[in-house]
Image (cartoon, rainbow, N blue to C red):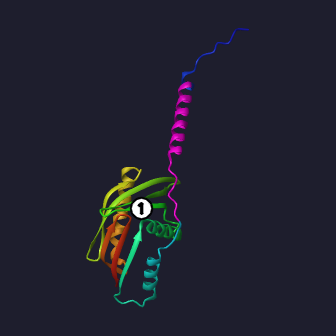
Amino acid sequence: MAALKTRWNWNRTIALVLVLANLFTWAQMLLALAKPHIVEPVMDPEVQALLSYIASGKHSGESWQINLTELEGEQTITWYLKKYPQIPFAYPQMQITPDYVVGEGDVLVTGLRLHVSGKVRITLKDGLPVVEIISLNLPLPPAMRQAIQDEIRIQLRRADLLPVRFTSAEWKDGEVIVKGVIK
């Protein structure tokens, strides 16, 4: 019986190296995922009181004021997201400064959890908030990113449907004080 010659199969070697490199890359990516920023879903008491008063229908041009810290904002957003689970966003985190607001969290796109963030400047004009998007970090293809930015702008223009008008917004480090009147 003739001795079997062992031939080195380069195709299999290259395929094995590519599979191992792929597994290594996925492992590194999964290990690098940050733990989500988790806060309790709690509606801010001042926001709740204002919404309840508006819902009662007993209002007629009254003034209101809400002081909101970063944590209270995160908790109120989390409460809202829990109430509306069809919104594919979770783990909101925000940073309030006198010049801008940074928001970040995770969005669920086709079963994948992606971390997104944005920086905006909010001013008031004619009693309504005007939001200027300074930066938006969406790890998506350009066409999807543009569609999301366009939808954000459309949603922000709907502020004129709000039952309130804003008279002032004082942005501080970690807090905002908003004043307004009920229509």
Give the residue furthest to the right.
Answer: 1
Q: Going by the picture, which residue comes out furthest to the top?
A: 2
Q: Classify residue 127 by image quadrant.
A: bottom left
Q: Against 72, is 162 above or below?
A: below
Give 78 or 87, whichever is nearer the viewer: 78
Q: Quadrant of the N terminus?
A: top right
Q: Residue at x 54, y 22 (%)?
A: 10
Q: Name the residue at 39% across, 49% down.
A: 141
Q: Is residue 111 above or below residue 177?
A: above
Q: Nearer the viewer, residue 22 or 100?
A: 100
Q: Residues within 10 Å of mark 1 (few under 14, many from 20)?
A: many
Quadrant housing residue 125: bottom left
Q: Position of residue 149 (x, y in %)?
A: 35, 59
Q: Which residues are magenta?
A: 13-39
Locate the C terminus by quadrant: bottom left
Residue corresponding to mark 1: 94
Report whether 168 appears left or right of 145: left
Which residue in the rendered view is the most extreme toward the left? Answer: 126
Quick check: 62 above or below 77? below
Kindly state the secondary structure of the residue where label 1 is placed: strand
- Foreground pick, 9 / 2: 9
